[in-house]
Protein backbone atom coordinates (compact mmCIF):
# COMPACT_ATOMS: atom_id res chain seq x y z
CA UNK A 1 0.00 0.00 0.00
CA UNK A 2 2.71 2.36 1.04
CA UNK A 3 4.65 1.55 -2.05
CA UNK A 4 1.68 2.33 -4.25
CA UNK A 5 1.14 5.76 -2.71
CA UNK A 6 4.81 6.50 -2.95
CA UNK A 7 5.01 5.55 -6.59
CA UNK A 8 1.91 7.59 -7.36
CA UNK A 9 3.43 10.60 -5.67
CA UNK A 10 6.64 10.12 -7.58
CA UNK A 11 4.84 9.81 -10.90
CA UNK A 12 2.84 12.98 -10.35
CA UNK A 13 6.04 14.77 -9.41
CA UNK A 14 7.66 13.65 -12.64
CA UNK A 15 4.63 14.66 -14.72
CA UNK A 16 4.70 18.05 -13.01
CA UNK A 17 8.36 18.49 -13.83
CA UNK A 18 7.81 17.66 -17.49
CA UNK A 19 4.87 20.06 -17.71
CA UNK A 20 6.82 22.79 -15.96
CA UNK A 21 9.54 22.72 -18.59
CA UNK A 22 8.28 25.47 -20.88
CA UNK A 23 11.73 26.21 -22.23
CA UNK A 24 11.26 23.92 -25.23
CA UNK A 25 11.17 25.80 -28.49
CA UNK A 26 9.27 24.34 -31.38
CA UNK A 27 11.06 23.62 -34.63
CA UNK A 28 8.47 22.56 -37.18
CA UNK A 29 9.52 20.56 -40.24
CA UNK A 30 7.56 19.42 -43.26
CA UNK A 31 10.27 17.00 -44.31
CA UNK A 32 10.87 14.00 -42.03
CA UNK A 33 14.41 13.51 -43.34
CA UNK A 34 15.26 17.11 -42.48
CA UNK A 35 13.73 16.77 -39.05
CA UNK A 36 15.82 13.69 -38.32
CA UNK A 37 18.93 15.46 -39.60
CA UNK A 38 18.16 18.43 -37.35
CA UNK A 39 17.68 16.27 -34.26
CA UNK A 40 20.81 14.22 -34.84
CA UNK A 41 22.83 17.41 -35.41
CA UNK A 42 21.66 18.79 -32.06
CA UNK A 43 23.00 15.66 -30.40
CA UNK A 44 26.33 15.78 -32.20
CA UNK A 45 27.10 19.46 -31.71
CA UNK A 46 28.52 20.77 -28.49
CA UNK A 47 27.36 23.89 -26.70
CA UNK A 48 30.39 26.25 -26.72
CA UNK A 49 29.39 27.99 -23.50
CA UNK A 50 28.47 25.07 -21.27
CA UNK A 51 31.11 22.69 -22.70
CA UNK A 52 29.83 19.57 -20.96
CA UNK A 53 26.62 19.31 -22.92
CA UNK A 54 25.36 19.11 -26.47
CA UNK A 55 23.06 21.64 -28.12
CA UNK A 56 19.91 19.62 -27.50
CA UNK A 57 20.66 19.35 -23.80
CA UNK A 58 21.37 23.00 -23.21
CA UNK A 59 19.25 26.06 -22.76
CA UNK A 60 22.10 28.56 -22.58
CA UNK A 61 21.27 31.59 -24.77
CA UNK A 62 24.08 30.75 -27.19
CA UNK A 63 22.83 27.15 -27.50
CA UNK A 64 19.35 28.43 -28.35
CA UNK A 65 20.82 30.76 -30.99
CA UNK A 66 22.87 27.95 -32.49
CA UNK A 67 19.85 25.63 -32.53
CA UNK A 68 17.98 28.30 -34.45
CA UNK A 69 20.92 28.62 -36.84
CA UNK A 70 21.07 24.83 -37.37
CA UNK A 71 17.31 24.86 -37.94
CA UNK A 72 17.66 27.61 -40.55
CA UNK A 73 20.46 25.77 -42.36
CA UNK A 74 18.68 22.40 -42.35
CA UNK A 75 15.51 24.07 -43.64
CA UNK A 76 17.60 25.53 -46.46
CA UNK A 77 18.43 21.95 -47.42
CA UNK A 78 22.03 21.84 -46.17
CA UNK A 79 23.52 18.42 -45.53
CA UNK A 80 24.75 17.30 -42.13
CA UNK A 81 28.33 17.83 -43.25
CA UNK A 82 27.65 21.33 -44.55
CA UNK A 83 26.03 22.38 -41.27
CA UNK A 84 28.92 20.97 -39.26
CA UNK A 85 31.48 22.70 -41.47
CA UNK A 86 29.58 25.96 -41.12
CA UNK A 87 29.83 25.79 -37.34
CA UNK A 88 33.42 24.51 -37.28
CA UNK A 89 34.39 27.51 -39.46
CA UNK A 90 33.10 29.78 -36.72
CA UNK A 91 33.59 27.92 -33.46
CA UNK A 92 36.41 25.49 -34.27
CA UNK A 93 36.69 21.72 -33.90
CA UNK A 94 35.57 22.10 -30.32
CA UNK A 95 31.95 22.27 -31.42
CA UNK A 96 31.86 18.75 -32.88
CA UNK A 97 32.11 15.59 -30.83
CA UNK A 98 34.01 13.77 -33.58
CA UNK A 99 36.80 16.18 -34.46
CA UNK A 100 38.88 15.44 -37.59
CA UNK A 101 42.20 13.61 -37.31
CA UNK A 102 44.60 16.57 -37.41
CA UNK A 103 47.89 17.54 -35.80
CA UNK A 104 46.22 19.14 -32.78
CA UNK A 105 43.86 16.19 -32.29
CA UNK A 106 46.38 13.32 -32.64
CA UNK A 107 46.62 12.90 -28.86
CA UNK A 108 42.86 12.88 -28.54
CA UNK A 109 42.43 10.09 -31.07
CA UNK A 110 45.49 8.01 -30.25
CA UNK A 111 45.40 8.12 -26.44
CA UNK A 112 42.71 5.42 -26.06
CA UNK A 113 44.56 3.10 -28.42
CA UNK A 114 47.80 3.72 -26.57
CA UNK A 115 46.19 3.03 -23.19
CA UNK A 116 44.67 -0.15 -24.58
CA UNK A 117 48.05 -1.36 -25.82
CA UNK A 118 49.72 -0.58 -22.50
CA UNK A 119 47.00 -2.40 -20.57
CA UNK A 120 47.15 -5.41 -22.89
CA UNK A 121 50.91 -5.68 -22.63
CA UNK A 122 50.76 -5.50 -18.83
CA UNK A 123 48.15 -8.27 -18.69
CA UNK A 124 50.05 -10.47 -21.13
CA UNK A 125 53.33 -9.90 -19.35
CA UNK A 126 51.78 -10.83 -16.01
CA UNK A 127 50.28 -14.05 -17.36
CA UNK A 128 53.56 -14.95 -18.91
CA UNK A 129 55.61 -14.31 -15.78
CA UNK A 130 53.07 -16.08 -13.51
CA UNK A 131 53.48 -19.29 -15.47
CA UNK A 132 57.21 -19.30 -14.99
CA UNK B 1 61.19 -6.20 -12.71
CA UNK B 2 58.18 -7.86 -11.13
CA UNK B 3 58.12 -5.27 -8.37
CA UNK B 4 58.03 -2.42 -10.83
CA UNK B 5 55.26 -4.15 -12.68
CA UNK B 6 53.23 -4.49 -9.51
CA UNK B 7 53.68 -0.83 -8.86
CA UNK B 8 52.55 0.06 -12.36
CA UNK B 9 48.85 0.54 -11.50
CA UNK B 10 49.77 2.86 -8.66
CA UNK B 11 52.19 4.80 -10.84
CA UNK B 12 49.66 5.18 -13.63
CA UNK B 13 47.03 6.22 -11.11
CA UNK B 14 49.29 8.97 -9.79
CA UNK B 15 50.10 10.13 -13.31
CA UNK B 16 46.39 10.21 -14.12
CA UNK B 17 45.59 12.24 -11.01
CA UNK B 18 48.32 14.76 -11.79
CA UNK B 19 47.23 15.12 -15.42
CA UNK B 20 43.55 15.46 -14.59
CA UNK B 21 44.27 17.86 -11.76
CA UNK B 22 46.32 20.11 -14.02
CA UNK B 23 43.37 20.30 -16.43
CA UNK B 24 41.01 21.02 -13.56
CA UNK B 25 42.87 24.08 -12.39
CA UNK B 26 43.71 25.32 -15.87
CA UNK B 27 41.60 28.19 -17.15
CA UNK B 28 39.67 26.34 -19.78
CA UNK B 29 36.90 28.75 -20.61
CA UNK B 30 39.00 30.33 -23.35
CA UNK B 31 38.29 28.71 -26.68
CA UNK B 32 40.83 29.53 -29.30
CA UNK B 33 39.17 31.49 -32.07
CA UNK B 34 39.26 29.95 -35.54
CA UNK B 35 38.99 33.45 -36.96
CA UNK B 36 42.55 34.29 -36.00
CA UNK B 37 44.45 35.39 -39.15
CA UNK B 38 41.21 35.62 -41.07
CA UNK B 39 39.49 38.73 -42.32
CA UNK B 40 36.52 40.24 -40.47
CA UNK B 41 33.37 38.52 -41.82
CA UNK B 42 31.04 40.39 -44.17
CA UNK B 43 27.94 41.87 -42.55
CA UNK B 44 25.30 44.58 -42.86
CA UNK B 45 23.70 45.69 -39.62
CA UNK B 46 22.12 48.89 -38.32
CA UNK B 47 23.92 51.49 -36.27
CA UNK B 48 22.93 51.46 -32.59
CA UNK B 49 22.12 55.15 -32.26
CA UNK B 50 20.83 55.71 -35.82
CA UNK B 51 18.89 52.62 -37.00
CA UNK B 52 18.56 54.01 -40.53
CA UNK B 53 22.34 54.00 -40.98
CA UNK B 54 23.69 50.63 -42.12
CA UNK B 55 27.11 49.52 -41.00
CA UNK B 56 29.11 47.01 -43.00
CA UNK B 57 32.61 45.57 -43.00
CA UNK B 58 33.94 48.58 -44.95
CA UNK B 59 32.79 50.89 -42.12
CA UNK B 60 35.44 49.31 -39.92
CA UNK B 61 38.23 51.31 -41.47
CA UNK B 62 40.15 53.03 -38.70
CA UNK B 63 42.64 50.25 -38.20
CA UNK B 64 44.16 48.72 -36.15
CA UNK B 65 41.12 48.45 -33.91
CA UNK B 66 39.34 46.41 -31.32
CA UNK B 67 35.86 45.01 -31.80
CA UNK B 68 34.21 44.74 -28.41
CA UNK B 69 31.13 42.53 -27.98
CA UNK B 70 28.97 43.87 -25.17
CA UNK B 71 25.42 44.23 -23.86
CA UNK B 72 23.62 45.99 -21.02
CA UNK B 73 22.56 42.61 -19.57
CA UNK B 74 26.21 41.60 -19.29
CA UNK B 75 27.60 42.43 -15.86
CA UNK B 76 31.22 41.76 -16.77
CA UNK B 77 30.91 44.32 -19.58
CA UNK B 78 30.33 47.02 -16.96
CA UNK B 79 33.56 45.98 -15.29
CA UNK B 80 35.63 46.47 -18.44
CA UNK B 81 33.88 49.67 -19.49
CA UNK B 82 36.31 52.02 -17.65
CA UNK B 83 39.22 50.31 -19.41
CA UNK B 84 37.63 50.89 -22.81
CA UNK B 85 37.09 54.53 -21.85
CA UNK B 86 40.75 54.74 -20.94
CA UNK B 87 41.78 53.36 -24.37
CA UNK B 88 39.68 56.08 -25.97
CA UNK B 89 40.93 58.85 -23.71
CA UNK B 90 44.55 57.97 -24.33
CA UNK B 91 43.86 57.42 -28.06
CA UNK B 92 45.53 54.02 -27.92
CA UNK B 93 43.47 52.59 -30.78
CA UNK B 94 39.96 52.68 -32.22
CA UNK B 95 37.31 50.54 -30.53
CA UNK B 96 34.23 49.39 -32.41
CA UNK B 97 31.27 48.26 -30.35
CA UNK B 98 29.16 45.23 -31.21
CA UNK B 99 26.01 45.55 -29.16
CA UNK B 100 24.96 41.94 -28.76
CA UNK B 101 21.33 40.82 -28.37
CA UNK B 102 20.40 43.89 -26.43
CA UNK B 103 17.63 46.40 -25.93
CA UNK B 104 18.39 49.38 -28.14
CA UNK B 105 17.18 52.16 -25.84
CA UNK B 106 18.85 50.64 -22.77
CA UNK B 107 22.14 50.39 -24.66
CA UNK B 108 21.96 54.00 -25.87
CA UNK B 109 21.15 55.17 -22.36
CA UNK B 110 24.08 53.32 -20.84
CA UNK B 111 26.49 54.89 -23.33
CA UNK B 112 25.05 58.32 -22.48
CA UNK B 113 25.43 57.92 -18.73
CA UNK B 114 28.68 55.92 -18.49
CA UNK B 115 30.40 57.33 -21.55
CA UNK B 116 30.79 56.02 -25.09
CA UNK B 117 34.18 54.44 -25.86
CA UNK B 118 33.13 53.31 -29.36
CA UNK B 119 33.92 54.84 -32.73
CA UNK B 120 30.80 53.10 -34.08
CA UNK B 121 28.24 50.84 -32.43
CA UNK B 122 26.88 47.93 -34.44
CA UNK B 123 23.43 46.82 -33.32
CA UNK B 124 23.26 43.01 -33.58
CA UNK B 125 19.83 42.20 -32.19
CA UNK B 126 19.76 38.56 -33.31
CA UNK B 127 23.46 37.85 -32.80
CA UNK B 128 24.05 37.23 -36.53
CA UNK B 129 27.49 38.77 -36.79
CA UNK B 130 28.24 37.35 -33.35
CA UNK B 131 27.73 33.80 -34.66
CA UNK B 132 29.94 34.57 -37.68
CA UNK B 133 32.60 35.73 -35.22
CA UNK B 134 32.21 32.59 -33.11
CA UNK B 135 31.06 34.58 -30.09
CA UNK B 136 29.76 32.43 -27.24
CA UNK B 137 29.44 34.90 -24.42
CA UNK B 138 29.86 38.57 -23.67
CA UNK B 139 32.17 40.33 -23.25
CA UNK B 140 34.48 39.28 -26.05
CA UNK B 141 37.16 41.40 -27.68
CA UNK B 142 38.81 40.97 -31.08
CA UNK B 143 41.97 42.66 -32.33
CA UNK B 144 41.81 43.68 -35.99
CA UNK B 145 45.14 44.65 -37.54
CA UNK B 146 45.94 47.29 -40.17
CA UNK B 147 45.11 44.88 -42.98
CA UNK B 148 41.71 44.06 -41.52
CA UNK B 149 42.69 40.63 -40.23
CA UNK B 150 41.61 39.33 -36.84
CA UNK B 151 44.74 38.54 -34.84
CA UNK B 152 43.51 37.67 -31.36
CA UNK B 153 40.34 37.12 -29.39
CA UNK B 154 39.75 37.42 -25.68
CA UNK B 155 36.71 36.01 -23.90
CA UNK B 156 35.89 37.77 -20.67
CA UNK B 157 36.75 41.07 -19.05
CA UNK B 158 39.38 43.14 -20.84
CA UNK B 159 41.83 44.42 -18.24
CA UNK B 160 45.18 46.18 -18.39
CA UNK B 161 46.81 42.80 -17.76
CA UNK B 162 44.97 41.08 -20.63
CA UNK B 163 45.72 44.05 -22.89
CA UNK B 164 49.45 43.84 -22.15
CA UNK B 165 49.62 40.05 -22.48
CA UNK B 166 47.41 39.45 -25.48
CA UNK B 167 46.85 42.57 -27.54
CA UNK B 168 49.58 45.15 -27.13
CA UNK B 169 52.13 43.20 -29.21
CA UNK B 170 49.90 43.41 -32.29
CA UNK B 171 49.59 47.17 -31.92
CA UNK B 172 53.38 47.49 -31.68
CA UNK B 173 53.78 45.18 -34.69
CA UNK B 174 51.40 47.33 -36.72
CA UNK B 175 53.11 50.60 -35.85
CA UNK B 176 56.54 49.12 -36.68
CA UNK B 177 55.49 47.90 -40.10
Image (cartoon, coloured by chain):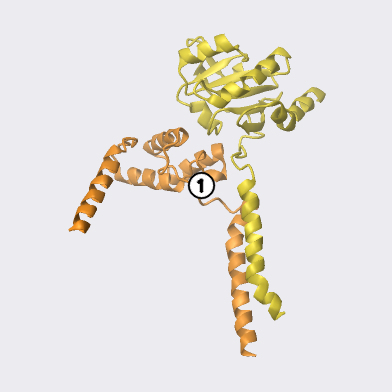
Residue B61 quadrant: top right
Q: Is residue B40 visible?
A: no
Q: Residue at x 59, y 65 (%)?
A: A113
Q: Nearer the viewer, residue A99 or A53?
A: A53
Q: Position of residue A129 (x, y in %)?
A: 65, 85
Element class at badge 1: loop
Q: At x 22% / y 58%, what residue is drawn?
A: A3
Relative side of A86 to B114, left or right: left
What is the chain identity of the residue bearing mark 1?
A: A
Color of chain A here? orange
Q: How many marks?
A: 1
Closer-to-camera residue (B99/B17): B17
The residue that mark 1 highlights is A96
Residue B106: tell me if it is visible. Answer: yes
- Position in image of residue B118 (x %, y %): 61, 15
The colour one sees for chain B in the rendered image is: yellow
Q: Quadrant of the C terminus of chain B?
A: top right
Which residue does the image show at 70% across and 78% down from the upper left? B3
Amino acid sequence: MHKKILSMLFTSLLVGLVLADDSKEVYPFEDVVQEERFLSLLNELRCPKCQGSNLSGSNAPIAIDLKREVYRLVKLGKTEKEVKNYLVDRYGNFIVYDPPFETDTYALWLAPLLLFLVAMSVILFRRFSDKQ
Amino acid sequence: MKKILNLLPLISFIVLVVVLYSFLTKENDQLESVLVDKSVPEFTLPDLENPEIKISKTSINKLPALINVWATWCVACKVEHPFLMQLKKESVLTVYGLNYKDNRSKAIKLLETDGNPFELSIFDKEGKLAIDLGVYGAPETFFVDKKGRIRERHVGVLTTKVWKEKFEKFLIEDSDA
